[in-house]
Amino acid sequence: MLPRGWRLGFRNKLLVASLLCLLLPASITLYISNSYTEHILRSQVIQNERRSLEQESLYISNLLSNMVLVANYIQFDPGITLILKENWQRNKLHEPDTAKHILDFKEVTDKLNSVTSMMEKTFVTVLTSDGQYYSNYAYAKLDIGALLKQPWMEQARQQPAFELYWAGVLANYIPTAAPSSPQVLTIARNLKLSSNSTYATLIISIAESRISQIFNDNRQGQETLLIAPDGTVLAARDKTRLGRTFALMDAVKHSEGSGFMDYRGEQYLLSSLEIPYGNYRIVSLSPYREAVSQISATHRWSSAVQIVSGAFFLLILVLLVRQFTKPVIRLDQVAARVDRGELGIRSGVRGYDEIGRLGKSFDHMLDRVERMIIQIKVEQAQKRKAELAMLQSQINPHFLFNILNSIRLRIMMRGDEENAELLFSLSRLLRMTIQQRDEYTTLHDELHIVRSYVELLNFRQSEEVSLDTDCTSESLGVKIPRFLLQPVIENAYIHGLHQESGRILIRTRTQDHRLLIEIEDNGQGMDEVTLDRLRAELSSEWQEKEAMPSSRLAHIGMSNVYERLYLTYGAAFQITIDSLPGQGTTFRFVLPEEIPDQGYERERGSDV
């Protein structure tokens, strides 16, 4: 119906459609983007400042947490408290003991140095009621009399027992450290007897500069401050701010985290976040113009890139459309002949664009069939290896780290060799589980892992489980999948022994080029119904794997063991389970001595 001059060919129609599809959405997008830019920028700036404050709060909280941990360690360390109380008693009875004092002084200072050696530089001072003191720093020229007369010291000595006094930022009272750290953030605690008599005062400080270094004041006019509940500035990059009252403290108290306000004739973003120590608060004050400059620049660059990309696309489209129709027609003709069975025909279409690559790929399709089949086999083998790695990685190490933390705390509080040995066992187990990446290990190394695992389990309960082994020397060198025995030991420990005392026995031997492994416990065992259900679940586990929900695969147990054995040995393995109520349970594995080649299709594994 259009005049002849208005009729468009295929190429022109394609160009017009491309222009409409490109320019119309781009114009609408730019309009909406410009309309909501201000709101988006404000939200983005607030989020960025919030994330920055949260990161800085985490660092500062760690520093303050270390100070609190040191205070708790000293107060509850039996060796230190005993020395301080005996010193108080001798002073009260006027019975000085110079030799004893020298030995006590060395013991206390050694412990103070030990507890702070792995932390940021922390100054620890213990003042006794008779004017003596212990420290972890060089105490030359330290004026104890002047220190005791400080106003904050008087307030600290009036605090109840077990309460920390947050003295804030003070002039460094340690002459040897004052040149490098003029101000220190200090906390104090009274150490009292049951009669409420103070026998010592504990003072812990860190350099204020260590806190201010954390602040990310990377924009012009931005300030990040650590503020006390009364508004006093405790830490800042600008040292003239220290000890002064923050001018916008009222706005901080009434704000809900972040907000914009006029300050010094300019709009500022004020953000604050309270940290869980001393009711301190981190406050960030940033000029809005500087805060959004980077985001605005990103927005402008994004728009420019879109425009340039659109223009470049149109130019390339005009050039390519002219060459587009001929190869498409040629490919259509060749495809029709191939459909009629002429598989020997080739299109001859070549080029560096999509159509050229399509023609080349089409011509080589039949030649690549054999290579694709080989490639699929290789990919299947790699997939099995990835599944083995996934199943192997399902062993959750959270309990190991929890135990490691418990041992570390016990060593810090007591320092005994028993827990040091436990730490060694756990470290050995972690090293073997995390650092090693091999899929297989020898039975000898696997037994080492199991023994370390049982030692750690015994640490967590009052009644111990004994682990005995009866292994032939020939069987110890046989390679098996890593962590094959650990799920079975865990199953016996939890379900068989109910985390109570008992005995687990592992027997291994080789016979007819096969490895025989028996794991026996003297727990409560299983009745016939439970045993049959377990056997049925294991025998059907692999068949139902495709339909299993992802949450089911996250559990570690005998299904994990069965699947890993199937992926490793195919049908060349056996698992049997025997159990009687009240007489324990026995798991038996029969495995080949050699790990088979995994580059072939596996058949269904042996039933349990």
Image (spheres, rainbow, N blue to C red):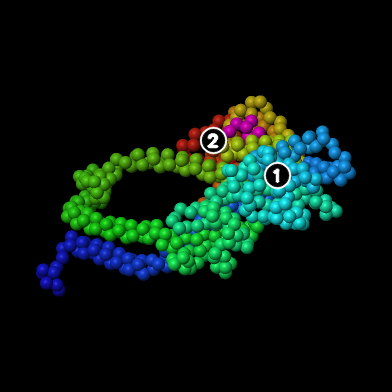
Count how many numbered circles sit on residues in the image. 2
The verdict on residue 354 being magenta is no
Q: Secondary structure at mark 1?
A: loop
| The C terminus: image quadrant | top right
Residue closest to the far left = 4
Q: Where, by quadrant of the figure, is residue 126 drawn?
A: top right
The residue depicted at 55 percent of the width and 56 percent of the height is 241
| The N terminus: image quadrant | bottom left
Tell me which segment is drawn in magenta: 441-448
Label 1, residues with CA under 10 Å away: few <14, some 14-19, many ≥20: few
Q: Where, by quadrant of the figure, is residue 431 drawn?
A: top right
What kind of residue is marked 2? Asp
Please state which of residues 281 and 91 is positioned toward the viewer in this rendering.
91
The residue tagged 1 is 143
**In this rendering, position of residue 305 left or right of residue 412:** left
Expressed as whole percent of the image width and height from the top left, the position of residue 75 reads 75, 48
